[in-house]
Image (spheres, rainbow, N blue to C red):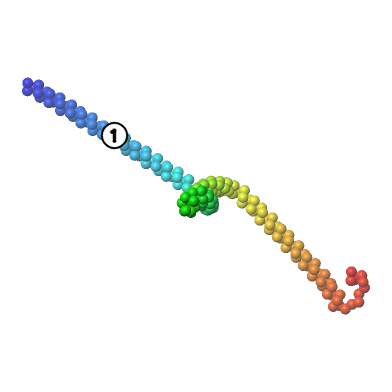
């Protein structure tokens, strides 16, 4: 019986040792997978950060974002002011209906509610429209910046050429007037009787 018990104990120790080794191996495998997953996540995060940095440093993106912001501010404030005026007017008009029952207090209350609603709605709609419109204009201008610069240079060249032409014509006119004035001056100061052919 003792031999059987010792054999059973040795089998339990062997099985327990195998279980411990199996658990240790599973833990090591899980740790290796976790490290691999962390490395993959770190690499993806680094790639995403680099991509975002490249995207944000693109001049086209910067130009489009600035134009969209400017459009949103300009059109949004105009939309908010328009919405405030229209909403207050509509709210006051709606407040006229129950004015008999509220002793007239519904008119300013309606104007306040309508104005606030109009302000928020107008500012939101205006900002969205301004952002989209401004962004589209900014992107188009950036995309066609070479053509715009070329057209501007051509225009400046034409203006410069026209200015030189006008300057030359003015100089010619001044010289012509001086010449005629000196001829007339010479005739009058010179005192000669001259013939009528000389005076013509």
Front residue of 93 and 40: 93
- Farthest residue, direction front: 100
Front residue of 151 and 43: 151
The spot of residue 56 in percent (x, y) is: 47, 47
Count the numbered circles shown: 1
Up-down relation of residue 192 to residue 48 (above or below): below
Residue at figure coordinates x 45%, y 45% from the top left: 52
Q: Is residue 8 left or right of residue 143?
A: left
Q: In this orientation, does residue 100 appear?
A: yes
- Identify the residue position indicated by label 1 in the image: 30
Q: Secondary structure at mark 1?
A: helix
Residue at figure coordinates x 92%, y 72% from the top left: 196
User: Residue 155 appears in which quarter of the rendering?
Assistant: bottom right
Q: Quadrant of the N terminus?
A: top left
Q: Quadrant of the C terminus?
A: bottom right
Front residue of 184 and 29: 184
Q: Is residue 81 left or right of residue 158?
A: left
Residue at figure coordinates x 59%, y 47% from the top left: 144
Q: In this orientation, does residue 118 appear?
A: no
The spot of residue 186 in percent (x, y) is: 84, 75
The spot of residue 195 in percent (x, y) is: 92, 73
The spot of residue 31 in percent (x, y) is: 28, 36
Question: Callout 1 environment at 10 Å: few (<14), some (14 to 19), or many (20+)?
Answer: few
Residue at figure coordinates x 37%, y 41% from the top left: 42
């Amino acid at each position: 019986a003792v031999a059987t018990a010792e054999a059973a104990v040795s089998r339990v120790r062997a099985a327990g040792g195998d279980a411990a080794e199996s658990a240790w191996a599973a833990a090591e495998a899980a740790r290796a997978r976790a490290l691999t997953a962390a490395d993959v996540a770190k690499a993806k995060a680094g790639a995403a950060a680099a991509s975002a940095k490249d995207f944000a440093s693109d001049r086209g993106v910067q130009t489009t974002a600035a134009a969209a912001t400017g459009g949103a501010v300009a059109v949004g404030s105009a939309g908010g002011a328009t919405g405030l005026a229209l909403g207050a007017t509509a709210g006051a008009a709606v407040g006229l209906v129950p004015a008999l029952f509220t002793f007239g207090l519904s008119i300013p209350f309606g104007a306040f509610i309508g104005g606030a609603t109009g302000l928020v709605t107008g500012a939101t709609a205006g900002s969205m429209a301004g952002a989209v419109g401004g962004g589209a204009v900014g992107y188009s201008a950036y995309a066609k910046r070479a053509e715009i610069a070329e057209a501007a240079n051509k225009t400046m060249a034409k203006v410069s050429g026209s200015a030189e032409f006008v300057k030359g014509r003015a100089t010619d006119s001044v010289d012509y007037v001086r010449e005629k004035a000196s001829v007339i001056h010479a005739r009058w100061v010179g005192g000669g009787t001259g013939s009528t052919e000389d005076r013509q």
